[in-house]
Image: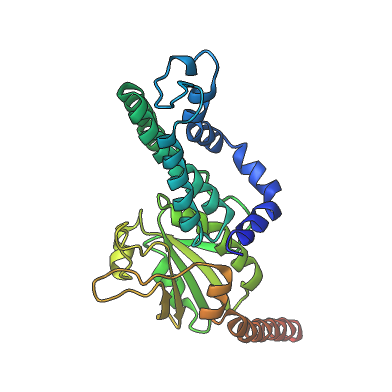
Amino acid sequence: MALLTPLLAFLYHLPQVYKWLLRPYYVASLFMSIAFLMVRKTPGVCEHLSTQREDGNSCDFDWREVEILMFLSAIVMMKNRRAITVEQHVGNIILFSKVANVILFFRLDIRMGLLYLTLCIVFLMTCKPPLYMGPEYIKYFSDKTIDDELEKDGRVTWIVEFFANWSPECQSFASVYADLSLKYNCAGLKFGKVDIGRYGEVSKKYKVSTSPLSKQLPSLVLFQGGKEVMRRPQVDKKGRAVSWSFTEENIIREFNLNELYQKSKKLSKTKGEKNQFNCLSSLVI
């Protein structure tokens, strides 16, 4: 069952996966992920490689290379248990494939290992994963606007994501958060985001660490009347985030979104009736 669920999810999102893989970032990542496979299997190249196979066939994997690839597969399976989106599944496969390629190339020839490692570093520094650009009902805050927006109307409940563009976890969570905003946004329940990688003062004020070691990115905070009510993930006394999965189901349950939405719709009706009354009063006058 642990293997069947990710497989079904992958097949369901297959058309979307194709769109991602056709983007330049993923095309380049895919070629880098299978680089060792191509070198080992390409005729005219593989004949010149060293091998530890007893039959001397340098165009096939030796027993040590198979062990490394099997170990990689086990790590990917363990890591993907906590993945919540298809992007995270694909990202984990690409990441650990590159790690395996580095090990395999260094084992084969130190010069090839150095060349591949250099390419990985250059790719990491120059290429960034494409950001989510789909539909959403989210207001983006700056360090100058967040406080005013949260305190403007005490009847409005805000759910704010504290994120950083460089964080892979934040990038993967973007589509989930956007879907939630499309389903639950209304006059009394609003969704916001603030890039604390860019606005350091906001990070300090709301006590969300940008350190990768703290694992606090992304952080979701619920505000009512301009004050924090709850946040996920929670943070322990040492400043480290308590493990929590950012699935849509978890967020709906923990933040009680269905109940909040029903209460917030009443505020929408109240505002509509008030505006209608004001219009009628103006006509009478």
x, y (%) of residue 164? 40, 55
Q: Quadrant of residue 215?
A: bottom left
Residue 8 % position (x, y): 67, 57
Residue displayed at 37% across by 31% down: 122
Foreground pick, 42 / 8: 42
Whether residue 118 is visible, yes or no, is no
Spot occupied by residue 27 in the image (x, y as percentages of width and height): 56, 34
Give above or below for 253 relative to 203. below
217 displayed left or right of 280: left
Q: Is residue 17 left or right of residue 202?
A: right
Q: Give the percent coordinates (x, y) of residue 108.
A: 36, 26
> In the image, 13: left or right of 148?
right
Q: Quadrant of residue 24?
A: top right
Q: Residue at image x 61%, y 76%?
A: 187
Which residue reaches farthest left?
A: 238
Extreme front residue here? 54
Of residue 180 and residue 249, the one placed in the foreground of this image is 249
Left-right relation of 153 to 269: left
Point out the image quarter for the N terminus.
bottom right
